[in-house]
């Protein structure tokens, strides 16, 4: 099982010492939080120290401190190059059923790791998909996970699939809307039926390719207006465009931010067509964001 080397630091650690001990490139990240908040790549000691202080400031914010002991630590991982995929699965007595394998076509190389597009089915060759699944099975077995949903993220390079994360949870945010199973039931209903012991007609995903774009935040400021929504929703293959930040609300980019501007969902006959539809829809959208300097 391939996984990046890692170490766990307290937020009270002297970052100058830790930076001398680190191997580069590396990624510093909190133990919790969502939407890649606080995840920063460092290529040298100076970047390490800057990232450490930046993450520590995030971890000392009241909403994060309330999360408890996990807010007192920073994980340092070796950076793994390669394409990234995500696996959505369901465990039953330790046996994994793969619900979806997502490609992430946009490179995630840092210094921050804002995710954008997820598309399923994966365009990996069958042999590559099997290696991803096998690595995920090894990871959930090592963690002792037996029952319920899992969300795994892996990177693939010439050495094989590297396990970056396995969470005992389903995919986050509104992204689950991209998935339909059997006669059209949602991921949430499938998971609830499993937990309650209710019958599940089929765990097979629908035949059409599907995907979601988490609309990235281009800059900090206050969202003043959104235009092009009707055109974005009218792109062939697009199911829905949902803007989740209200006009007048402050927008905070990564690594401090923890929200996307919204989500675009598409279904088409092929993964290539889904990606094309998502990008075309995003291109239609215009966001007026005004920077508000301190008075």
Image (tube, rainbow, N blue to C red):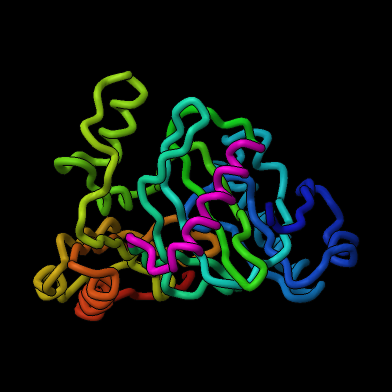
Does the magenta-highlighted stretch encompass residue 40? Answer: no
Does residue 170 show up? yes
Left or right of residue 45: residue 210: left
Q: Position of residue 236 (x, y in %)?
A: 11, 73
In this view, the residue farthest toward the top is: 197
Q: Position of residue 50 (x, y in %)?
A: 73, 68
In this view, the residue farthest toward the front is: 127
Q: Residue at x 16, y 66 (%)?
A: 238
Q: Position of residue 245 (x, y in %)?
A: 29, 58
Q: How many marks?
A: 0
- Given residues 277 and 251, the one toward you in this image is 277
Q: Residue 239: which quarter of the image?
A: bottom left
Q: Position of residue 223 (x, y in %)?
A: 30, 67
Left or right of residue 144: residue 181: left
Does residue 247 show up? no
Q: Which residues are magenta?
A: 120-142
Magenta portion: prevailing SS class: helix
Q: Residue 101: which quarter of the image?
A: bottom left
Q: Residue at x 16, y 60 (%)?
A: 240
Does the magenta-highlighted stretch encompass residue 126? Answer: yes
- Given residues 207 and 20, the one toward you in this image is 207
Q: Relative to 259, say whether 203 is above or below.
A: above
């Amino acid at each position: 099982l391939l996984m990046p080397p890692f170490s766990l630091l307290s937020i009270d650690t002297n970052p100058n010492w830790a930076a001398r001990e680190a191997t580069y490139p590396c990624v510093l990240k909190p133990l919790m939080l969502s939407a890649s908040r606080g995840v920063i790549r460092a290529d040298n000691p100076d970047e390490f120290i800057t990232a450490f202080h930046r993450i520590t400031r995030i971890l000392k914010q009241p909403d994060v401190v309330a999360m408890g002991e996990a807010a007192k630590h920073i994980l340092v991982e070796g950076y793994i190059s390669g394409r990234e995929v995500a696996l959505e699965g369901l465990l039953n007595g330790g046996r994994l059923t793969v619900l979806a394998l997502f490609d992430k076509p946009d490179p995630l190389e840092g210094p921050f790791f804002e995710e954008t597009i997820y598309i399923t089915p994966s365009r990996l060759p069958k042999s590559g998909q099997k290696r991803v699944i096998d690595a995920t099975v090894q990871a959930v077995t090592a963690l002792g996970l037996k029952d319920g949903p899992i969300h795994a993220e892996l990177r693939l390079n010439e050495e094989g699939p590297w396990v970056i994360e396995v969470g005992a949870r389903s995919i986050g945010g509104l992204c689950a809307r991209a998935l339909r199973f059997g006669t059209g039931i949602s991921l949430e209903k499938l998971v609830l039926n499993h937990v309650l012991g209710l019958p599940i007609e089929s765990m097979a995903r629908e035949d059409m390719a599907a995907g979601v774009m988490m609309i990235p935040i281009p800059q900090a400021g206050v969202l003043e207006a959104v235009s092009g929504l009707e055109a974005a929703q009218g792109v062939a293959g697009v199911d829905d465009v949902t803007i989740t930040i209200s006009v007048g609300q402050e927008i905070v980019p990564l690594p401090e931010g923890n929200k996307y501007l919204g989500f675009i969902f598409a279904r088409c006959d092929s993964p290539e067509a889904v990606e094309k539809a998502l990008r075309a829809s995003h291109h239609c959208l215009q966001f007026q964001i005004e920077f508000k300097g301190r008075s």
